[in-house]
């Protein structure tokens, strides 16, 4: 398997860069925004040039708030860009790996979602990602749709590094406020990368939740644990109602569990606190 060629979109993103650095494959090609993935001709030209066995599609418009006011861009990037890549893969022996989100499940329940639960996205971002999922499912047989959530890890200076940002805020302010009404799964990118490898090497296809295990973990719980593991003198308070005003009608519940991975005995994702401590210890070594 390690002799296969992999094409990764979004190579400079938090996930894309981690895949390129950590996947145990020798032949990886990453592409960035210099290739316009919304342009079908450019897409076909690049894939023909690379001749990949596997495409891992991480490039996306991920700003949930901005998607609400830029609906056209959201569907262009998250849906039609996916369509262009899928179009090339039709009738080709290429495994297509599509990165999705546990946020697509919506508001239908208060407990953790499994892969067989109804999908009812509430935001433009999650609707556009779900439309991308449908394109993949409707046109391909060899595919993985991986629903993950609250990703962290990688380079501490990446603009989306939630964990390191909270560290900087804590040492600057001494007090942090966090939302205790939204629940989800803080998920370590390094674990996610390993799980992707396991699925590829076991020749699995279909839809899988891929998150670190957590039960009813709020943003507040998450931030408190970050501060605890950094061992910083900082008070974490529950944010007053309305403190963090959002445009996007984000679901209160983005939590999920890896039901199918468990059924297949392929789940290697750790408990969320274990992985968070591993990552923060790595960051602390770099700060010494």
Image (cartoon, rainbow, N blue to C red):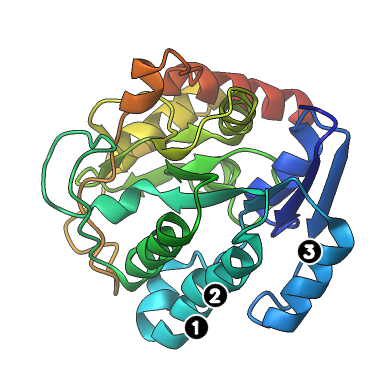
**Mark 1 in CB contact with mark 2 (< 8 angstroms):** yes
Q: Would you place residue 168 above or below residue 112 in this image? A: below
147 or 5: which is nearer to us?
A: 5
Instruction: Please provide percent x and percent y for residue 175.
Output: 41, 44
In screen coordinates, is 53 left or right of 263? right
Q: CA distance from mark 1 to mark 2?
A: 6 Å
Q: CA distance from mark 3 to mark 2?
A: 18 Å
**Mark 3 in CB contact with mark 2 (< 8 angstroms):** no
In screen coordinates, is 52 left or right of 255? right
258 or 236: which is nearer to us?
A: 258
Within 10 Å of disc 1 (Cα), the crowding (few <14, some 14-19, many 20+) is some
User: Could you tell me if residue 171 is visible in this image?
Assistant: yes
Secondary structure beneath disc 3?
helix
* Residue 47 marker: 3
Residue at 53 percent across and 21 percent down: it is: 275
**Label 1 belongs to which residue?**
73
Within 10 Å of disc 3 (Cα), the crowding (few <14, some 14-19, many 20+) is some
In screen coordinates, is 146 left or right of 116? right
Q: Determine the residue located farthest toward the front in the rendered image.
A: 91
Within 10 Å of disc 2 (Cα), the crowding (few <14, some 14-19, many 20+) is many
Residue at 75 percent across and 32 percent down: it is: 23
Secondary structure beneath disc 2?
helix
Of labels 3 and 2, earlier in sequence is 3
Instruction: Please provide percent x and percent y for residue 113.
Output: 23, 37
Q: Nearer the viewer, mark 3 or mark 2?
A: 3
**Label 2 belongs to which residue?**
77
Name the quarter where the C terminus is drawn.
top right
Secondary structure beneath disc 1?
helix
């Amino acid at each position: 398997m390690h002799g296969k060629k992999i094409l990764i979109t979004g190579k400079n993103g938090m996930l894309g860069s981690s895949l390129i650095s950590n996947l145990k494959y020798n032949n990886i090609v990453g592409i960035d925004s210099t290739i316009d993935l919304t342009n079908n001709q450019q897409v076909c030209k690049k894939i023909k040039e690379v001749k990949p066995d596997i495409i891992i599609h991480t490039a996306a418009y991920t700003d949930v708030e901005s998607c609400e006011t830029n609906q056209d861009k959201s569907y262009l990037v998250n849906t039609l860009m996916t369509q262009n890549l899928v179009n090339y893969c039709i009738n080709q022996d290429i495994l297509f790996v599509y990165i999705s989100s546990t946020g697509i499940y919506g508001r239908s329940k208060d407990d953790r979602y499994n892969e067989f639960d109804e999908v009812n996205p509430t935001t433009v971002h999650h609707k556009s990602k779900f439309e991308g999922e449908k394109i993949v499912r409707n046109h391909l047989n060899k595919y993985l749709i991986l629903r993950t959530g609250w990703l962290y890890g990688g380079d501490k200076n990446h603009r989306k590094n939630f964990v390191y940002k909270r560290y900087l805020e804590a040492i600057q302010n001494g007090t942090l406020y966090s939302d205790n009404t939204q629940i989800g799964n803080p998920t370590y990118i390094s674990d996610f990368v390993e799980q992707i490898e396991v699925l590829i090497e076991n020749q699995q296809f279909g839809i899988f939740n891929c998150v670190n295990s957590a039960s009813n973990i709020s943003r507040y719980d998450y931030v408190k644990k970050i501060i605890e593991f950094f061992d910083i003198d900082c008070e974490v308070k529950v944010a007053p109602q309305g403190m963090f005003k959002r445009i996007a009608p984000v679901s209160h519940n983005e939590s999920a569990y890896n039901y199918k991975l468990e059924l297949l005995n392929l789940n290697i994702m750790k408990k969320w606190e274990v992985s968070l401590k591993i990552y923060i210890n790595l960051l602390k070594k770099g700060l010494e």
